[in-house]
Amino acid sequence: QVQLQESGPGLVKPSETLSLTCTVSGGSVTTGSYHWNWIRKPPGKGLEWIGYLSYSGTIKYNPSLNSRVTISVGTSQSQFSLRLSSVTAADTAVYYCARASGFPVYAFEVWGQGTMVTVSS
Amino acid sequence: QTVVTQEPSFSVSPGGTVTLTCGLTSGSVSTANYPSWYHQPPGQAPRTLIYSTNTRSSGVPDRLSGSILGNKAALTITGAQADDEADYYCILFMGSGVWVFGGGTKVTVL
């Protein structure tokens, strides 16, 4: 049973870079036809898709965040990371990592518990 | 930019039926978008309910069902229960290879 766990600083200063890591227990981000995603939920708002890294190396980002986001394989093949640059208070949110299946299912199957990140000086 | 539309909120009586919809500001939702539905109770991570339009995730009761109604995807909850109170999200996979999320529907059972 694959499990995901987010980790990283809970407080980031404005204009700095937010960095988070998702650790995959029981799996690897380089095997299986999966999309390894980052999603966030700002306080009082809905879920927002940030982007994904696929097993084949394809990377896709939300166009609204494209210029500030980088998703990559982590220091091991059981990790992937998120970097979001030039953060503002609007980037305050609970950040989730999630695994989605590709063809022919296309569904988010496994979610992490989420980690709260606050942008404040 | 593609925007997915969902009703902001719905109220349903215990035992009642509610149908949530998921549309696009331009174009129609079809099975080729592989619509999926998730609910997120307060303070918890999202949980998968329906994927590929109408396939229930493991453990999801058959009183929840997914479909295409006209030009939208739909999630119908019958026999509503107190623990159905949650935010419900629709997610679509687009041909360009990106995911788009709806804004969510807050369902209240009272």
Image (spheres, helix red, strand yellow):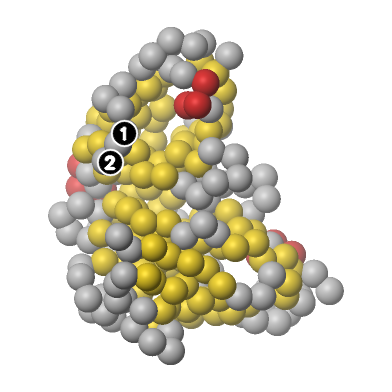
For the C terminus of chain B, the quadrant is top right
Question: Which mark, residue B57?
Answer: 2
Identity of the residue drawn at 56% across and 23% down: B108
Dot 2: element: loop
For the N terminus of chain B, the quadrant is bottom left
Give the total of numbered labels: 2
> Residue beneath label 1, please?
B60
Viewer-side residue, B71 vs B62: B62
Viewer-side residue, A87 vs B23: A87
Q: Residues within 10 Å of mark 2 (few under 14, many from 20)?
A: some
Identity of the residue drawn at 43% across and 89% down: A75
User: What percent of the width, then of the height, locates residue A22?
Assistant: 47, 72
CB of mark 2 within 8 Å of CB of mark 1? Answer: yes
CA–CA distance in space, label 2 to label 1: 6 Å
Identity of the residue drawn at 65% across and 81% down: A17
Question: Which mark, residue B91?
Answer: none
Chain of residue at mark 2: B
Callout 2, which amino acid?
Answer: Ser
Identity of the residue drawn at 55% across and 79% down: A83
- Image quarter of residue A27: bottom left
| In the depicted structure, whether residue A84 falls above or below residue B38 | below
Q: Is residue B57 left or right of residue A90?
A: left
- Residue farthest along the left direction in this orientation: A104
User: What percent of the width, then of the height, locates residue B44?
Assistant: 55, 46
| In the depicted structure, whether residue A93 falls above or below residue B25 | below
Q: Is residue B52 left or right of residue B27?
A: left
Callout 1, which amino acid?
Answer: Val
User: What percent of the width, then of the height, locates residue A57?
Assistant: 28, 81
Chain of residue at mark 1: B
Viewer-side residue, B102 vs A33: A33
Dot 1: element: loop
